[in-house]
Structure formats: structure tokens, C-alpha cells
Image (spheres, rainbow, N blue to C red):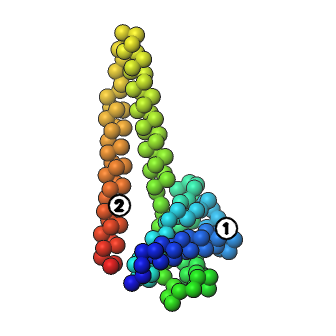
Amino acid sequence: MATDRRVSRVAASIKREISQMLMQDIKDDRVGTGMVSVTEVIVSGDLQHAKIYVSIYGSEEAKATTLEGLASAKGYVRSELGRRIRLRRTPEISFLHDLSLERGTNMVNLLNQLSYERSLVEANSEQDSPIELDDELDDELDDELDDELDDELDDELDDDLLETEED
């Protein structure tokens, strides 16, 4: 079992090398469809498995196509990692779409919209001409925020359970 420090160093090395491969080495046209960046690499404690989270900018079709291209390039990426990083065994890799940036942007937009609406209410209440927020919109925003937070907590719990099961 590798130490936490070693695991994090291996994860950082894998992230750096795969980012380099994405920019220069992977020739699959599908990977170039959307802008791809490696956001996080999680390596198991025994250094046998690596989850590579990628953020893909583009349309839904471009995202799906890029993920297909990454999945088909998995063998090449693993063999290149074996050449570039000196480990006894090269970890099995899996590419996962990281939605955290999109969720964060959506969350900020919802918070900005709520802030704007509340400032309108405060400005109108000072003028003694009260207007009410559209209750339906306010409820929808609250529901979306709750759903986003619930999804993030569920994902974190699932990841923690998977890591516990792998150990």
C-alpha cells in the first residue's frame, strides 16, 4: 500500500502527462471536437486504478464524441503512461466527465438571479409600491439549488463508498 504522499505525487504526474498527451499526442479527431482539460486524477491506494476527470467545453454532441474518443484512446494513453512514468504496474485508467465546473457556473447564475430579484424587491419596498417575486420562479430556483446540492452530496458519498470498497 502506497503512502498518501506517494499516491498524490503519482496522481499529479498522471495528470501532467495526460494533459500533455491531450495537447500533442492523441491524434483521434473525436478528442479534438471539444476543448478538453484534465481537472482531477484520483488514484487508488494500491496505485492499480486511476480515475481521470475531464472537463469538456462544447455542445452535448461534442462532449459525447470526445468521451468516445477518449475511451477508444485508453489503451494508447495507458501504454504511454507506462513509458513516461516509472511504476511497477501502470494503473488501469478510466475517463469520467467532470460536471463540477458546469454545476458551479449554474449555481452562480442561480445565486446571481436570486440576488437580483431580492434587490428589486428591496428597491420597490423602499418606494412603498410592493411587487412580489414570481412565486413559481422563486420555488423553481430553490428546488434547483436543493437538487444541485443533493446531487453533489450524493456523488461525494458514492465516491467515498467506492474508495472504501476498493481499499
User: What kind of residue is marked 1?
Assistant: Met
**Cα distance between the residues tagged 1 and 2:** 29 Å
Q: Which of the image's four quarters has the C terminus?
A: bottom left
Element at label 2: helix
Q: Which residue is mark 1?
A: 23
Residue furthest right in the image: 24
Q: Position of residue 88 (x, y in %)?
A: 51, 90
The answer to which of marks 1 and 2 sits earlier in the sequence is 1
**Dot 1 alpha-carbon crowd within 10 angstroms: few under 14, some 14 to 19, many 20 or more:** few
Relative to 30, is 95 on the left or the right? left
Q: Is residue 162 above or below residue 129?
A: below
Q: Is residue 25 above or below residue 99?
A: below
* Residue located 39% across and 84% down the image: 1
- Depth check, front residue: 57 or 160: 160
Element at label 1: helix
Q: Position of residue 121 (x, y in %)?
A: 38, 21
Q: Position of residue 148 (x, y in %)?
A: 36, 49
Q: Is residue 155 above or below residue 17?
A: above
Q: Position of residue 6 (x, y in %)?
A: 47, 77
Q: Which mark is residue 155?
A: 2
| Residue 119 occupies quadrant | top left
Q: Is residue 72 visible?
A: no
